[in-house]
Image: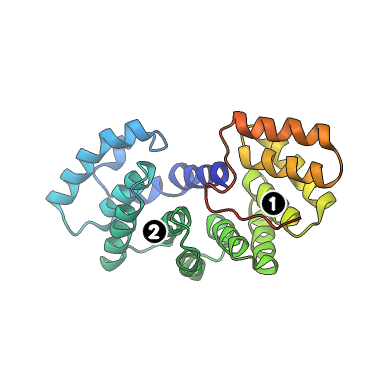
């Protein structure tokens, strides 16, 4: 789910959070936070904002986003908690917490964060997707599938939802169904290493070794390594 996690976080940055910063002095010049190099450059400006107004919850959320992009997940969590302490008003801060905890393999906290986000926004696509991932890692596949299908229902234009449903189908040995969803994910985004990997494993389970080899090779070209987020596959 590495590629999918990145895509989800990019969506959070690009589509959900910026409108919330309209009252923040940094909002007017907020750069592309999906670029770690740019995010690092932006850190000094956010620190200055916090120094000038240490009670500005939105600034802590911005810095949490930067820390996440720099892979400083514990620092990002600290800033999220500070924003919550300062009564940051909406659900997105819990989504950022969930992303951080997922990348630290803390699945219980990920589920808790997603529950908090969904209690504030029952249509939060990212929360359903991240909770599906957490349930899947805990091998609670019925709950994982329910959340994955809900994320798909909320946004059928996002390949991450198709990848997650396909991955869960593979793990529960629903191979033909897995292939259908993974084909859709790859057709929508041909840079998803995890989708290629699980499609390759699915092809192998269906006896299609040539197709499996090509997909696994493609996942390696995309630098996807199984287990990067502690993904434990069911033994065949």
Name the side, left or right, on which 51 lies relative to 37.
left
- Percent across and percent down for residue 106 are 46, 62
Residue visible at 56% across and 41% down in the picture = 3
Residue 45 visible, this orientation: yes
Using the rendered view, name the quadrant where residue 172 is placed: bottom right
Task: Sort mark 2 into few (<14), some (14-19) or many (20+) by Cα contacts within 10 Å.
Answer: many
In this picture, residue 155 sits left or right of residue 18: right
Image quadrant where one finds the C terminus: bottom right
Q: Position of residue 177 (x, y in %)?
A: 82, 52
**Colour convention of the picture:** rainbow
The relative height of residue 210 versus residue 129 in the rendered view (above or below) is above
Q: Residue at x 76, y 40 (%)?
A: 183
Residue 101, position in %: x, y?
43, 59
Circle 1 crowding by C-alpha within 10 Å: few under 14, some 14–19, many from 20: many
36 left or right, relative to 48: right
Task: Pick the residue in front: 209 or 13.
Answer: 209
**Alpha carbons under labels 1 and 2: distance apart:** 27 Å
Q: Residue most toward the left? A: 52
Q: Are the residues at dot 1 and dot 2 in contact (C-beta closer than 8 Å)?
A: no
Q: Is residue 22 something one can see in this rendering?
A: no
Q: Earlier in the sequence, mark 1 or mark 2?
A: 2
Residue drawn where x is 33% and y is 48% of the image:
72
Q: Residue furthest front?
A: 235
Which residue in the protein does label 2 denote? 93
Question: 138 above or below 43?
Answer: below
Q: Nearer the viewer, mark 1 or mark 2?
A: 1
Task: Residue at 39%, 58% (x, y): give it.
Answer: 93
Q: Is residue 87 left or right of residue 16?
A: left
Element class at badge 2:
helix
Residue under label 1, please give it.
167
Q: Residue furthest right?
A: 207
Q: Position of residue 121 (x, y in %)?
A: 51, 65
């Amino acid at each position: 789910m590495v590629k999918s996690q990145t895509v989800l976080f990019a969506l959070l940055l690009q589509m959900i959070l910026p409108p919330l910063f309209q009252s923040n002095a940094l909002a007017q010049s907020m750069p592309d936070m999906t670029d770690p190099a740019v995010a690092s450059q932006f850190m000094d400006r956010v620190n200055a904002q916090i120094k000038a107004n240490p009670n500005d919850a939105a600034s802590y959320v911005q810095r949490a986003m930067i820390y996440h992009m720099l892979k400083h997940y514990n620092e990002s969590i600290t800033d999220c908690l500070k924003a919550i302490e300062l009564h940051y008003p909406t659900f997105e801060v819990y989504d950022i917490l969930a992303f951080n905890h997922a990348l630290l393999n803390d699945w219980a906290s990920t589920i808790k964060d997603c529950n908090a986000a969904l209690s504030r926004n029952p249509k939060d696509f990212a929360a359903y997707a991240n909770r599906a991932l957490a349930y899947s890692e805990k091998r609670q596949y019925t709950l994982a599938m329910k959340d994955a299908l809900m994320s798909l229902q909320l946004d059928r234009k996002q390949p991450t939802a198709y990848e997650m449903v396909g991955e869960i189908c593979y793990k529960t040995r629903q191979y033909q169904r897995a292939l259908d969803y993974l084909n859709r994910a790859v057709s929508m985004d041909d840079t998803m290493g995890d989708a290629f990997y699980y499609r390759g494993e699915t092809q192998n389970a269906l006896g299609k070794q040539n197709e499996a080899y090509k997909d696994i090779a493609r996942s390696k070209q995309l630098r996807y390594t199984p287990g990067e987020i502690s993904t434990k596959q069911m033994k065949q």
